[in-house]
């Protein structure tokens, strides 16, 4: 016995309800935009009040290194998207070794590796800068640089943890369903967002200087 | 949802206009750009555009008119199941406690972090996998 009405008109179009998890994630990422707005505001204000610190500070940057690191992060967004395509066809695992046969798990492991390389690159860059006496407490330039890139780095690290949790979920189920695909999709939203924020930071900090 | 989309696009126009007004006004009265307001108001426009654009995509993929866009719809027509929320889970409480401890560590003494971070990881993993193991394994 069912309590559902059976008299639904046959001509009525099928309406898919919005995915609440996906919409909620986007609204939350909207609030993250404002979090980074605060950091950008700090950066621009300090840069306009003490331009001489920026002239001295940006000299120690290794821009080609940062550009390579940026490229790796941007490409990791591409691999994350291929993972989402696999999740959307409900394919968790590979059916062969060729990338066209990869499932969500393989693509997300690759994305994880690239994101981890980015974080390692950033830690290496921090070590170089500290050896050049640019630190969080050295001056306004150091504070602005480490606050903006540091909070971004923490977001990347959080995304890496999220990828591991989604991969773990895919391993823990016998049948990969839309529910699991949703968590893969929202983690990819977050990853693309963090990627776009980094493109903004890279342009402002390394290109615009 | 169409109304929501329109409201967000109106907000985009409003914040974009306000960014221009604020920046110009600051330039006229102080001869320099006031970055906090310019960045904050400008990114408010970006935030609104971001949500409006995404809601447009969602609205298109629903493939029909949602109840909230119909004048003849009743309230409970647009009362979908919001999602699955565990009625008895202790994991959010556990995680919140661990994160509170972590912030106490930042404030009072970094050694507390060595206990708080593993607890937070435990709470996070416990929460994420709550419906993926034991009785709920599938």
Image (cartoon, rainbow, N blue to C red):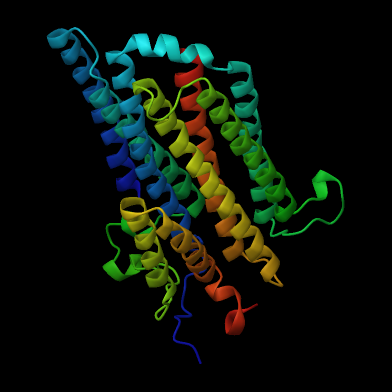
The answer to whether residue A103 is left or right of residue A77 is right
- From where the camera sits, is residue A189 visible? no
> In the image, residue A56 lies at what x, y percent?
43, 10
- Residue at x 22%, y 10% (from the top left corner): B32
The answer to whether residue A120 is left or right of residue B46 is right
- Residue at x 58%, y 17% (from the top left corner): A63
Q: Quadrant of the C terminus of chain B?
A: bottom right
Q: Is residue A117 above or below residue B1?
A: above
- Residue at x 66%, y 59% (from the top left corner): A167
Q: Nearer the viewer, residue A137 or A12?
A: A137
> In the image, residue A131 lies at what x, y percent?
54, 24
> In the image, residue B30 lies at what x, y percent?
15, 10
**Hey, which quadrant is residue B5 in on the image?**
top left
> In the image, residue B68 lies at what x, y percent?
32, 57
Q: Is residue B83 above or below residue A43?
A: below
Q: Nearer the viewer, residue B55 or B130?
A: B130
The answer to whether residue B92 is left or right of residue A131 is left
**Hey, which quadrant is residue A148 in on the image?**
top left
Residue farthest along the bottom direction in this orientation: A1
Tag count in the figure? 0
Q: Is residue B29 above or below residue A83?
A: above
- Residue at x 87%, y 53% (from the top left corner): A96
- From where the camera sits, is residue A208 visible? yes
Q: Nearer the viewer, residue B7 or B88?
A: B88
């Amino acid at each position: 016995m069912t309590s559902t009405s059976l008299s639904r008109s046959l001509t009525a179009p099928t309406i898919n309800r919005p995915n609440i998890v996906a919409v909620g994630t986007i609204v939350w990422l909207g609030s993250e935009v404002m979090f980074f707005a605060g950091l950008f505001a700090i950066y621009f204000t300090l840069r306009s009040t003490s331009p001489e610190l920026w002239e001295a500070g940006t000299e120690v940057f290794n821009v080609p290194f940062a550009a390579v690191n940026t490229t790796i992060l941007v490409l990791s967004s591409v691999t994350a998207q291929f993972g989402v395509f696999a999740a959307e066809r409900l394919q968790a695992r590979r059916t062969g070794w060729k990338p066209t046969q990869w499932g969500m798990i393989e693509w997300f492991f690759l994305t994880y590796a690239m994101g981890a390389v980015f974080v390692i690159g950033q830690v290496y860059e921090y070590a170089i800068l500290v050896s050049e006496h640019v630190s969080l407490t050295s001056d306004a330039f150091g504070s602005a640089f480490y606050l903006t890139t540091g909070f971004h780095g923490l977001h990347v690290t959080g995304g890496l943890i999220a990828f591991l949790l989604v991969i773990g979920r895919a391993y823990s189920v016998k049948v990969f369903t839309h529910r699991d695909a949703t968590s893969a999709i929202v983690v990819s939203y977050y990853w693309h967002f963090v990627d776009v924020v980094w493109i903004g930071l890279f342009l402002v900090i390394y290109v615009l200087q | 949802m169409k109304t929501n989309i329109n409201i967000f696009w109106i907000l985009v126009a409003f914040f974009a206009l306000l960014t221009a007004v604020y920046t110009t006004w600051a330039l006229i009265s102080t001869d320099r750009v006031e970055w906090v307001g310019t960045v904050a108001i400008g990114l408010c426009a970006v935030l609104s555009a971001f949500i409006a654009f995404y809601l447009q995509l969602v609205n298109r993929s629903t493939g029909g008119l949602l109840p909230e866009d119909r004048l003849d719809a009743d309230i409970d027509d647009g009362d979908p199941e919001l999602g699955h929320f565990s009625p008895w889970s202790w994991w959010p409480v556990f995680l919140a406690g661990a994160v509170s401890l972590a912030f106490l560590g930042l404030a009072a003494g970094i050694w507390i972090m060595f206990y708080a971070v593993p607890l937070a990881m435990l709470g996070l993993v416990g929460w994420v996998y709550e419906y993926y193991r034991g009785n709920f394994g599938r």
